Amino acid sequence: MNSRRGALTFLVAGYLTLPTSPLAGSEIDKVLPLPQWQPPPGAVTTEALPPGTLIGSPLIPDALLTEDDLQDISSKLQSSPPSIAEEIESAPKQEIDLSLFLPDSLLGKTALVGTETPPTPTNLLLPLGPAFLEVCRKSPKDVDLIDPDSHVSETQREDLVRFLDFHNRDAKISACVVVTDRDQIIPEGVDLSQFASGMVKERDSCLVVYPLGEPWRARLFLSNTVHEKAGADYLQSLIEDCASDAREVTDPLEQLHRFTVRLSIRLFWLEKVTHSHAPTLAATPIPPLSADFAETREAALRAAIQHSDTSHGTTVDFLTFWKWVIVGISASIVGLAILTLAWGYRRRQMRHRVWTLPEVEVPARLGGTFSGGGGAFLKYR
Amino acid sequence: MNCPRCHLEISRSADQCASCGFNSHSLCQKLGDHWVRLDRLTDPSNCLRLHDRRKLEARLDDFERRFPQVFFAVYIGVLPVGFSVSEVGFWLLNHAAFGTHDISKRNEFGIVLAIDPSASTAAFSLGYALESVESSLQLPTLLNSISPKLKRGDFGRAVEISIRTVDKRLRSVGTSRQREARVSASHAVSSDLGLVPLKSSARTALVEREPSPYRMDP
């Protein structure tokens, strides 16, 4: 071990004396010094700056700073940090009215029952412009609410679009609503089947042209397949029902909302009629109730109850089967318990009973005093 | 009745077998005519496990409790050549005092099951008093039923089945009555009267003093 250390020391000493060793390199540096970096002219060094001086920004190295970058902010700095409570107290009090941003229904405000606007006279009705009609024609098929003139506010529009989308997802007769101004009318000769890119022709659908604020002038257009199955009276009653429901309120947008909801309900009813086996029911008016209606209804109910009693026999049989199963299981458990008790009683009784055999006199045999060879013999292997 | 040696039928009052000449005298010439003391379970060949012995002891206690007159004894051992288990059973019932709890039981009411594991033979021997119910015991059928157990070497189980079957069949032919309460020996015996309880050692001494025409005195 000592010899190894000595050898290692000798090798290190020998290496250090070589011209290529690090010690030898310092001599060369004295002859040829490395270039030293010097700051550019006009640059400001940070060592001579007073404390509290803002030095540019953290992204700019100190060596590139000039006098323009230096800012003496010592006068701007406060002696103590600002207090939040003071800021709150000093802030001017303002009342923020959220009602400007929220609908009346959320604020709990009931609809204003004001005076109803008188209907627009017929001679003052204006036909829809070509631009309006063009927008309606080019409207995509999946757009359920067509409002080129933006009569409906944004929030109401979103509500109506969601509602109509929900209706069209489940209903077989889809609905599309075109909103016009209260004094506008469809001009003569306009082919409404082209509205919404011909939606009415391609599938069972309903197109409603609704003048905002005058629900009684709304017009309903159905696909041929639906119109043929439904009677004219029924359709008339449909539109009248929707309009009368809308007139319960005076707010035009609320009227549009109620009209759309009622329309959706009536279209579901219409769907049951047009897509059922007896589509002609819609054409016939509902007959008035007869005088003996109550008696016939009671008789029918009685007959139905009797029929249900007999039909419930299968249910009764099912319950009877399980009842017998439960009875059988219970009887088995009870029987097992009785047998166990009887067995235990018999064992207890046997402990207290003895059996005696008759004393029989048998003559001696084969010279045996107590046994004469009686018994049995077996070779088992 | 069958001869214990040749197993041929013999008459009920024959003094010796007409076929082979077997009788108790010829057997005593080989085994002796002295009395021997024997436990209820005698297993010189160690065929019974300790667990089986304890179980069988309990079975035999119950058997003797139910039948005050009868006792059941078991002998499992390798017999010398020339002796069959029937002969040994016959000799034991006539010359053995079995260690039962109630020493008043007479050998006429004894049942001996002798098994020779080497010769693969087994035999039941009955006392005179049990010959009247021998047909009810169905001993040949019983031997056949325990034969599989004996072949497997499950002697404990075979003996247990034998005891249980004999118990059941004797109950069917016996007369049942309520057990009488026994007075303990310590109350019945009083040293003041000079009475000594009859213990097993005293019984053996009394038996050994009995004269026997077959004893071969040295």
Image: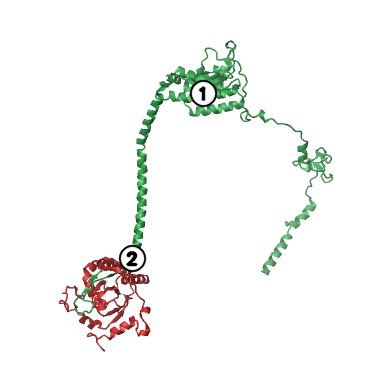
Chain colours: A green, B red
**Residue closer to the observer: A56 or B56:** B56
Determine if residue A162 is in view.
yes
Quarter placement of the C terminus of chain A: bottom left
**Residue closer to the observer: B142 or A148:** B142
Task: Spot the residue most to the top.
Answer: A123
**Residue closer to the observer: A139 or B192:** B192
Of circles 2 and 1, the one toward us is: 2
Q: Residues within 10 Å of mark 2 (few under 14, many from 20)?
A: few
Callout 1: chain: A
Q: Which mark, by number, is residue A190?
A: none
- Dot 2: element: helix
Quarter placement of the N terminus of chain A: bottom right
Residue A123's x, y, as percent?
58, 10
Q: Is residue A78 above or below residue B107?
A: above
Q: Residues within 10 Å of mark 1 (few under 14, many from 20)?
A: many
The quadrant in which residue B158 appears is bottom left
What residue is drawn where x is 40% and y is 27%? A297
Q: CA distance from mark 2 to mark 1?
A: 90 Å
Determine if residue A198 is in view.
no
Q: Which mark, by number, is residue A349?
A: 2
- Dot 1: element: helix
**Label 2 or label 1, whichever comes before in sequence order:** 1
Please give left or right for residue B50 compared with residue A41 in the image: left
> Do pointers 2 and 1 mark residues of a single chain?
yes
Q: Is residue A218 above or below residue B195?
A: above
Task: Spot the residue most to the bottom.
Answer: B218
Which amino acid type is marked by label 1? Leu
Residue position marked by numbered label 1 in the rendering: A263
**Residue closer to the observer: A342 or A110:** A342
Residue A302's x, y, as percent?
37, 31
What residue is drawn where x is 35% and y is 43%? A320
Q: Is residue B36 above or below residue A194?
A: below
